[in-house]
Image (cartoon, rainbow, N blue to C red):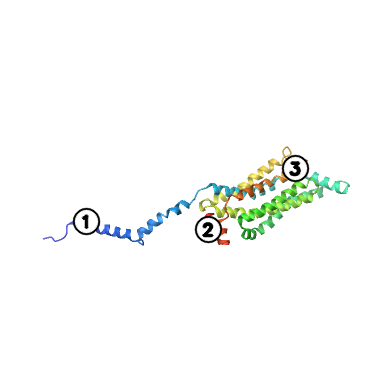
Amino acid sequence: MNNDPPLTNLLDSDNQETSIKTNDDRNDPLSASNILNDNDNPPLENRQNHHTGITNTLLLSVIAAISGTSFHFGYASGVLNAPQDVIEAFINETNYRREKTANMSQSIITLIFSLAVSIFAVGGMVGGLFGGFITNRLGRKGGMYLNNIISSIACILMFLSKPVYSYELLIIGRFLIGLACGYGTSVAPTYINEISPRNLRGTLGSSFQLGIVAMLCVSQAISLHAVLGSEDKWHYALGLPIVFSIMQVILLFFVPESPKYLLIKKNNLIDAEKG
């Protein structure tokens, strides 16, 4: 006589044991299934605050960062190309007004103009060297505010160079705008990288280079003789970039500071979470 229990009873017993284990797991907060479920379903408040796409604030922050940095860089790199002959004539006229002597030699005129062009790169090198120090001391937004003061002074000096007949002001202005652009190449990409979600850092990081080449094209068009590159208008082309500085100052009021700076440098967890 076979005393083995029927197969249906064994299946029922297994099902009962499985159901008991499942109920026990549900009541045990440390069970593997509950841990996996908790990881798959984070708290509602965390899911609501987790954004991986481009938001309006993020887009505005990127525009604010590049408006007073890469826009200046691209514009200043190409604005002196078209009106070279006009500016060289201005240098010669300035020397004649001062000394009332014969015209300056062409080699000296070319040397002064070349100095005005190349000193932009010297200023950029100096500004880039102090970028990290200023950014860590004043913050990303604070550094950009300071940068706008320098770039605004540069634009004013370059604009005044023609009315007061001083090519020295042109050279000093070019050095200062180079200083601002050199620092801008440090602070703007840092700010954009720190406010961007990980999956968008590459895309948004390229906006800095896009701003440079875009303003390079704009400066070439604006400095044409038919636009602002004539004998009586070329200084307007050099003073025009002050609009970029004003634009950035206004936009920075509506964007957050870098969360990384607030957390690591300022140890301000609340503002970092808001940012």
Q: Which mark is residue 105?
A: none
Residue 104 in view of the camera: no
Residue at 63% x, 58% y: name it.
138
Per the image, the residue denoted by label 2 is 270
How busy is the neighbourhood of tag 3: few (under 14 within 10 Å), some, or many (20 plus)?
many
Q: Which residue extends farthest left?
A: 1
What type is the residue that disc 3 sits on? Trp
Q: CA distance from mark 2 to mark 1?
A: 56 Å
**Precedes in sequence: disc 3 or disc 1:** 1
Residue at 70% x, 41% y: name it.
222
Q: Quadrant of residue 25?
A: bottom left
Q: Note whether 69 is above or below 221 in the view shown.
A: below
Q: Which residue extends farthest right?
A: 101
Per the image, the residue denoted by label 1 is 12
Per the image, the residue denoted by label 3 is 234
Q: Quadrant of residue 275?
A: bottom right
Please state which of residues 270 and 55 is positioned toward the viewer in this rendering: 270
Q: Which x, y percent locates residue 214?
A: 63, 44
Residue at 65% x, 45% y: name it.
215
How busy is the neighbourhood of tag 1: few (under 14 within 10 Å), some, or many (20 plus)?
few
Q: Which x, y percent locates residue 68?
A: 65, 49
